[in-house]
Image (cartoon, rainbow, N blue to C red):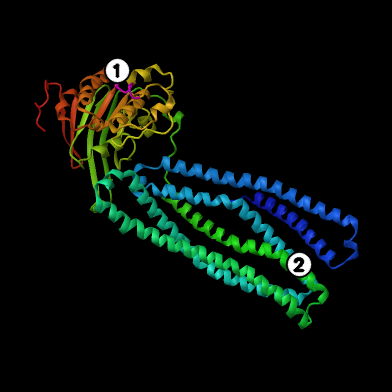
Amino acid sequence: MFNISPKKLVYLFIYALANTILSFGIVYIINNALAGEKAFLKDYMGMVFLVLVVYTYLLNIVFQKHLNKFSFKLLYDNEKKVFAKILNSPLVKLEKLGPQRFFSTVEDLRVFSLLPFTVTHTINSILMILLCLIYMFFLSVVSASVVIGIIALVVVCYFIVMNTMSKEIESLREYNDDYYRYVDDVIKGFKELKLSFFRRENLMNRFLIPNRDTSEKLDYKVTYVFLSINLISQYGLYVVIAVTLFVLPEMGVLDRADVIAYVVIILFISGPINNIINLQQTYTRFMVADKRIKKFNEDFDNDLPLTHHEEISATVFSSLDCKDIAFNYGQGTDENSFNLGPLNLTIQQGETVFVVGGNGSGKSTFINILTGLYQATEGNILLNGKKEATEGALQNLITAVFTDNHIFSHNYENYDIEENEEYAKLLETLELDHVVKDTKEESARRKFSKGQSKRMSLIFALLEKKPILVLDEWAADQDPHFRKFFYEVLIPRLKQQGKTIIAVTHDDAYFHIADRVVKFDYGQIVKDVSTKHLQKAGSMIW
């Protein structure tokens, strides 16, 4: 996920080497000063020591600036790529994999905010340990070998335990994925949950509580193991110092004069060793997060290019032709599979077409295909009789208000509503001017009732000025007065303006308002009836 170029690696190594040499120089001066070396007790040596400290500090500041800039660019670029993948993914894929994958992947990405700190401390620590060990070998080969042996034993024990933790961390992330599903159910299904005691109890007792209890145990286990392992470095250090002070001199492999130098070196490298050990927890989380992010990229990978504005220049609209359109949910034999079509339908510019049918008849699937949210598995949609019509060109002509409409928190459109006379007039037409009392953005983004929300969405759709308007059960949430106004006043007015209207509806009392009524059943068009001879509602039998 986070690939570093060879040039960056060379730059990183040069910095780390320079920083380590300077830091080692500090240790070398301390050791010799403690040992009473006259050359290291002169006045100018204090200045040298201070200069080394200052240069090391400045080197770290400069490098941290560049490393942080590089690392956070990687992090935020990948966050943007995740958003792009979601926005560019087919609706079917998002419905199948669930929105919680998006939330958990963003959380996985945030793990890499620790990357600059981790990389810097890892490289510095490793190089510092290597230089100090070389110095220890210079003082005594046998003593250095014994110390390295003890350190290696501690490290091996540590990594054996660490390997078992990666699976635990991955399991913990999977439980968190399920947790986000429950959160989504609570937020979106709050009213249904409040209406059913058993539903609430089952959600809590059969799903949420077991999930959180298991997660708590896993989280505690992982954290406890990491904390316990970290103590190994501390108490392992005591063992190494004890061997250096009492065992090695008695064995005659380390001179008493070098004991102080050895203890200082061991104390100095204890910090880098602790860094390496403590950072393994972070590396384990990196590996788990990286694996999950790669899986996300694989699952949401698709060949559809992002639609750019220049690719969807305005097109004069005269007709839409659905030619042998078919779509399949599932794998045909799957009990959850659903087949739409093949169906053929032509919609002319300026027509008002009502789409009707029972639940599961295929209305919503047809609307999703028409608007480009689903890709038809067979057939083509012809724009103005041309087969080469692109999805972008079609979507540039269509605006829609879906049954689960959403008022966005910000204005993502290419028009402004503030001081917009057309917007103010639409508020008045749709009887929202008493609710939205000005044309400020924050007033348009407030909390609305469902019916008012649908009206606001319709206003935003009309401001897009696209020739085709798709309305999915728009009138279902309106009161009788406004439903009548919608069918008998608003639709004819929009038709006079040249709008092509495709409305999913169950209001048979107003079928005569449409030019045609198209009925779906079991994924097929079973009726396509012109209503021009209808004079009143109820004269057509469905």
Residue beneath disc 2: 264
Tell me how far mark 2 sits from mark 1, CA to CA. Answer: 87 Å
Instruction: Give the label, 2 or 1, closer to the camera.
Output: 2
Look at the picture and state if 496 lies above or below 413: above
* Residue 243 against residue 466 in the figure, above or below: below
**Label 2 packing within 10 angstroms: few (<14), some (14-19), many (20+):** some
Query: Residue 234 placed where, x, y %?
Result: 64, 68
Determine the residue positioned at 69% across, 50% down. 11
Residue designated by label 1: 497
Question: Which x, y percent locates residue 101?
Answer: 41, 49
Front-most of residues 321 and 499: 499
Q: What stretch is highlighted in magenta?
A: 429-435
- Assign a secondary structure to mark 2: helix
Measured from the top left, where is residue 386 in percent x and y? 33, 29
Q: Which of 288 and 347 is in front in this view?
A: 288
Residue 192 numbered tag: none
State which quadrant residue 501 falls in: top left
Q: Which residue is at 54% across, 70% downward? A: 160
Q: Position of residue 89 (x, y in %)?
A: 40, 42
Circle 2: residue type: Val
Q: Is mark 1 on a helix, strand or loop?
A: loop
Residue farthest to the bottom? 251
Which residue is rendered at x = 39% and y = 30% of the image?
A: 445
In this rendering, would 23 be left or right of 352?
right
